[in-house]
Image: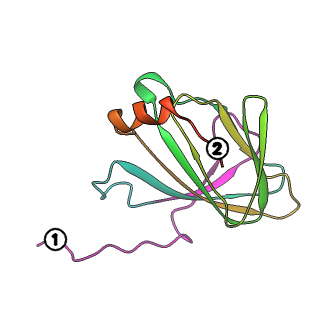
Amino acid sequence: MAPNYWKENDSTGIISRPVHHGEGDIKMRGFFDTISNLPVKFHVWEMDPGVTEGAHIHEGENSLEELYYFVEGKGELWFGEETLQVEAGDAVLVPQDVDHGMRNNSDKPMRVIVVWGKPDAEAALNLTKGRGRD
C-alpha cells in the first residue's frame, strides 16, 4: 500500500557545488526528486554573498522554464545584458531559450526556491508570441 504522504526537510540531504560554472558553491536541497511524478523539480538554494549561478540557456532537447522565488536576502538576475534586482518576496519566471544567471550581490545569504521543468509545447508557443515583463 502506498503511503498517504511524503515529508522531507530542507536541513538534510544538502549538496554544495557550483552551478552552471558559477562562482562559489550553492547549497542545494532537492525535494521529492525520486518519488514525485510531477514534471518539475523543486529545490531550495542558499547562496552566500558573491556566489553566482553561472549564465546558461535551456534550449533544444534541454529546453526548460525556470521559476525563482526569493525567500530571503537580495541579489540580481541577468538576462544577456539586462540586469534585474530581486529581493525576498519577488518571483521571476525565465522562459525557455533565454540566457540567464543569478548572483547574491548583498552581504547576507540569499535563499531561493527554484522550480524547473519542460513547458507544455502549446503554452510555450503562446508565451513566445507575446513575452511580457512586469
Residue 9 is situated, as x and y percent measured from the top left of the image, at 49, 73
Q: Marks 1/2: CA distance?
A: 43 Å
Residue furthest front in the image: 130
Q: Amino acid at mark 1?
A: Ala
- The residue that mark 1 highlights is 2
The reply, left or right, for residue 85 in relation to residue 41 is: right
Q: Earlier in the sequence, mark 1 or mark 2?
A: 1
Residue 44 is situated, as x and y percent measured from the top left of the image, at 57, 61
Residue 83 is situated, as x and y percent measured from the top left of the image, at 79, 40
Q: Secondary structure at mark 1?
A: loop
Above or below, 8 against 119 in this view is below
- Please state which of residues 14 and 91 is positioned toward the viewer in this rendering: 91
Residue 132 is situated, as x and y percent measured from the top left of the image, at 59, 40
What secondary structure is the stretch in magenta mostly built from?
loop
Name the residue located 38 percent from the left edge and 75 percent from the top edge: 7
Magenta stretch: give its range: 1-30
The reply, left or right, for residue 87 in relation to residue 106 is: left
Is disc 2 surrounded by few (<14), some (14 to 19) or many (20+) residues within 10 Å?
few
Residue furthest right in the image: 107
Is disc 1 surrounded by few (<14), some (14 to 19) or many (20+) residues within 10 Å?
few
